[in-house]
Image (cartoon, helix red, strand yellow):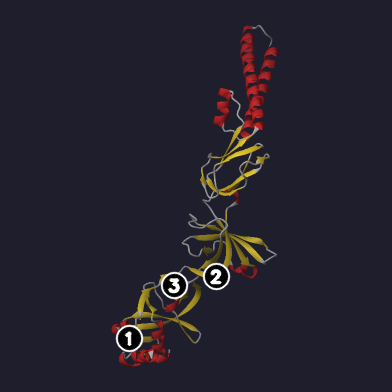
Amino acid sequence: MRKVLFGILLTGALNVFAEDMQIRISPEQIDNLAIKVGAMAPGRYIPLLSAPAKVVVPADKEILLSTPQPGLLTQLRANIGDKVEKGQLLAQIHSPELVTLQQQFLTARSELNLAGFSRSRDKKLLQEGVIAERRWQETQAMYSSKAAIAHEAKQLLSIAGMSQAEIETLAKTQTLDTLLNVRSPIKGVVLERLAALGTRLDMQAPLYRIADLSELWLEINIPQERLNSLHIGDKVQIPDSDRQAKITLLGQSVDQSNQTILARAVIQGDAGNLRVGQQLNVQIMQTSPEVSFRVPNSAVAQNAGHSYVFVRNADGFAVIEVKVVGKENQDSLVTASGLSDNAQIAVEGAVALKANWLGLGGDE
């Protein structure tokens, strides 16, 4: 019944007809057929292929935080997903070995002070002619040796995880403490916690994996037979996101398990809702070599292996043949010499226009 009514509307009551590549139709008939027009969006990129990808952190943006001294893990202050600042306290370790390093530092510092007193005394005696030059040189050498030992002891405390402020407090108070504070060396996000509270840890035992997420990459698996069609700089469209990436590397080896080649793409700007380790199916795009337009799939009509769009003009619609160079979701990317930036095309009702153009009436 709907087909019969549709045919009547097309061939009878509306008196619509087509000549060559022009469909003559009045505004009232356009409204009755629910034909809607809209502007075309310029299309700069051609969809090339879809491929699986994984969100990763660049190697130089990720650190593994480990314990600098053996001991008992007594406190953990960060959980997976927490944002941490540089220098923020993340863990505390009860480490008797730390006391030994503190004792060495205080002893070395005390001996350096004594050597300093001797150095000041002998300098004055040398100026008064009381001691020989050789005695002064020996005193200078002793002071330099004690200074080197004190500096080494201080460096060992720093390596053990004590901050500069904590070392200065130790020097002033001379109070030994077995509690070692482990702090974050970077600003970032905790990706993994690698130790359990109450565990006896060896030196360099891992505690946390922390990453600076200001820059993320996509590792894309490209079928080897499609590699030659890709180029450095190609755009990568991320699904369900307004984020984009740009290919910066094409791998030099083939994965033997799946015969794919790794392509790396750097995500532009803030990663938004993307997460490290997330699996995606991305669309790789290339710059169109000619002027192209993005139109809804519903605006493109097919006939005898050719594609057409219907461009609004004063008499109705002009039938313009186009070339579909790519598809992305609900849109097609088309090129044609007869299209201009300000053209208005039928975005809905193209089926009715095609039927009228081909003289099919209600059979289409």
Residue situated in front as seen by the camera: 43 or 157: 157
Which residue corresponds to the image point at 46% horizontal and 62% vertical from the top-left? 242
Q: Quadrant of residue 10?
A: bottom left
* Amino acid on which the number 2 mark rests in the picture: Leu
For mark 1, give the secondary structure. Answer: loop
The correct choice, above or below, for 204 with respect to 353 in the image is above
Residue situated in front as seen by the camera: 155 or 236: 155
Indicate which disc, 2 or 1, sits on the residue closer to the N terminus.
Answer: 1
* Amino acid on which the number 3 mark rests in the picture: Phe
Q: Residue 40: horizontal and vertical position, in percent?
A: 40, 72
Please tell me the numbered disc located at residue 293.
Answer: 3
The correct choice, above or below, for 354 with respect to 144 in the image is below
Residue 177 appears anywhere in the view: yes
Crowd band around label 2 with a 10 angstrom C-alpha radius: few (<14), some (14–19), many (20+)? many
Indicate which disc, 3 or 2, sits on the residue closer to the N terminus.
Answer: 2
Q: Say whether residue 264 is left or right of residue 43.
A: right
Please tell me the numbered disc located at residue 25.
Answer: 1
Residue 337 appears anywhere in the view: no
Q: Quadrant of residue 291?
A: bottom left
Please tell me the numbered disc located at residue 48.
Answer: 2
* Amino acid on which the number 1 mark rests in the picture: Ile
Crowd band around label 3 with a 10 angstrom C-alpha radius: few (<14), some (14–19), many (20+)? many
The correct choice, above or below, for 161 with respect to 31 in the image is above
Please tell me the numbered disc located at residue 149.
Answer: none
Mark 2 touches mark 1? (CB < 8 Å):
no
Indicate which disc, 1 or 3, sits on the residue closer to the N terminus.
Answer: 1
Q: Residue 199: horizontal and vertical position, in percent?
A: 65, 42
Q: Say whether residue 133 is left or right of residue 322.
A: right
Which residue corresponds to the image point at 32% horizontal and 93% vertical from the top-left? 12
